[in-house]
Image (cartoon, helix red, strand yellow):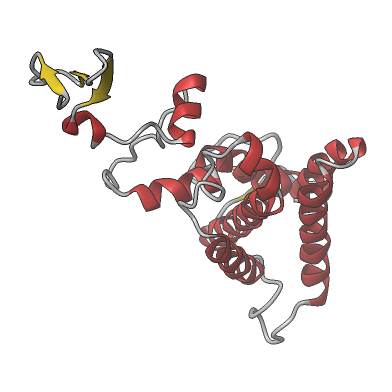
Amino acid sequence: GSPRSFGSCAGSSMCGRGDRNGSIRIFRSPDARSAAPLSAIESIRRRDGIRESATVPGVAGSPRVHAWLELIRPPNLPTIASNAVLGMWLGGLAQGRTLGLPGSSWSLDEASLRFDGSDLVLLARVITGLCGLYVVGLILNDVFDLAVDRRERPQRPLPSGRVRVGHAVIAAIAIWLGSLWMLGAVGGGDAFVDPPLLLWSMVLTAAIVAYDLLHTRVAWAVALPAVCRGLA
């Protein structure tokens, strides 16, 4: 009269049990029952061939660091550095001079403007400031697209919860203020604020935020990245 078990569950995830009516009910063994089903995010990763964030030397086993790196997309930053170098070169051309490398005899003319220590420091500050503004744009892009990403890209750091939205916003504000300082717009020279540099930085910031807000809403927003590159 009582249910009868048959076979062995050892080494198997499925067991069978006969009930009083002679039918067989199949159930999972306790070991298999403890294995949780795939999460929605993991299912999407497997379906689309998406892997966890790539291992970064020195931060192995740090998923939080991986999530932040995924959010700010470091491989894109060298293209921002090239903008700063191109800008310095064009600035030299505007003054009727070309740029040479320190310790090198290569130049296009005798009036070549060569880098010294202060030039390299200035270039490094400009590169850092522009990269900072770019990172701000990347973070805010994910913040503004959070609703869309929850539906279409739930594996991204913000919708998956690996990075909190509040933390992302705070980081964007902090990086933005640091970028203004690196670019000399605030906190440099005799005056705390350099009006021309601050105005240029605010225009660039406005273009970045406009793209983040509009790129999913209006077709002409695709031109805004070019505007940002030109301002940079």
206 left or right, relative to 112 = right
The image quadrant of residue 39 is top left
Q: Residue furthest front?
A: 1
What residue is at 69 percent from the left and 85 percent from the top? 192
Q: Quadrant of the N terminus?
A: top left
Front residue of 15/42: it is: 15
Question: How many labels, in total?
Answer: 0
Tell me where residue 63 appears, x and y as whole percent: 35, 47
Tell me where residue 75 appears, x and y as whole percent: 52, 37
Residue 99 visible in the shown view = no
Tell me where residue 57 appears, x and y as whole percent: 29, 41
Tell me where residue 97 appears, x and y as whole percent: 75, 46
What residue is at 7 percent from the left and 21 percent from the top? 10
Q: Is residue 113 above or below residue 192?
A: above
Residue 92 visible in the shown view = yes
14 left or right, relative to 196 = left
The image quadrant of residue 2 is top left
Q: Is residue 36 above or below residue 205?
A: above
What residue is at 11 percent from the left and 15 percent from the top? 6
